[in-house]
Amino acid sequence: MLSHTSNEIVWRASDVAQWTHVIPVGNVAEITILLSKYNAQMGVLAVGANAWF
């Protein structure tokens, strides 16, 4: 079974093709990000103990 040890929030401007910002948030179930959802694309990455996504 695969498991992860932490999470990262990634985001970018809507007109950019690649992720440009990373916010490490640890192993949490909920977080509040003060960023307008209308101007950005956001994603969540699960990071394993070996730092692989």
Image (tube, helix red, strand yellow):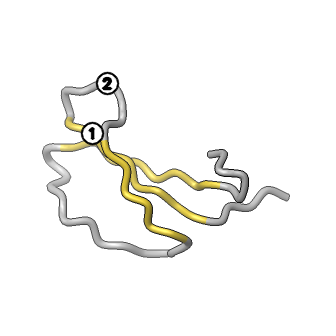
Q: Which of marks 1 and 2 is nearer the N terminus?
A: 1
Q: Which residue is drawn at 56% across and 72% down?
A: 27
Tell me the quadrant of the picture where the N terminus can be found: bottom right
**Quarter of the rendering containing residue 25:** bottom left
Q: Please tell me which residue is depicted at 62% across the width and 45% down the height of the picture.
A: 53
Q: Mark number for residue 28?
A: none
**x, y percentage for residue 45?**
52, 51
Q: Residues within 10 Å of mark 2 (few under 14, many from 20)?
A: few
Residue at the (51%, 69%) spot, across then down: 26
**Are the residues at dot 1 and dot 2 in contact (C-beta closer than 8 Å)?**
yes
Q: Is mark 2 on a helix, strand or loop?
A: loop
* Amino acid, disc 2: Ala
Residue tagged 2: 17
- Image height check: is 51 above or below 5? above
Image quarter of residue 15: top left
The amino acid type found where label 1 is placed reads Arg
Residue 29 placement, left or right of 1:
left
Q: In this view, does 10 lie to the left or right of 40?
A: right
Q: Name the residue under label 1.
A: 12
Could you say where residue 4 lies in the image, as x and y percent from the top left? 68, 61
- Furthest-front residue in view? 50
Q: x, y (%) of residue 8?
A: 46, 56
Tell me: residue 40, above or below residue 25: above
Give the class, few, some or many, for how many residues have Cα within 10 Å of label 1's Cα (few <14, many ≥20): some
The image shows a total of numbered marks equal to 2
Compare residues 39 and 23 and report the one nearer the observer. 23
Residue that lies at the very extreme toward the right in this rendered image: 1
Give percent across and percent down for residue 33. Answer: 26, 66
Task: Name the one closer to the observer, 20 or 45.
Answer: 20
Callout 1 secondary element: strand
> In percent of the image, x 41 and y 48: which residue is there?
43
Q: How far apart are marks 1 and 2 (CA)?
A: 8 Å
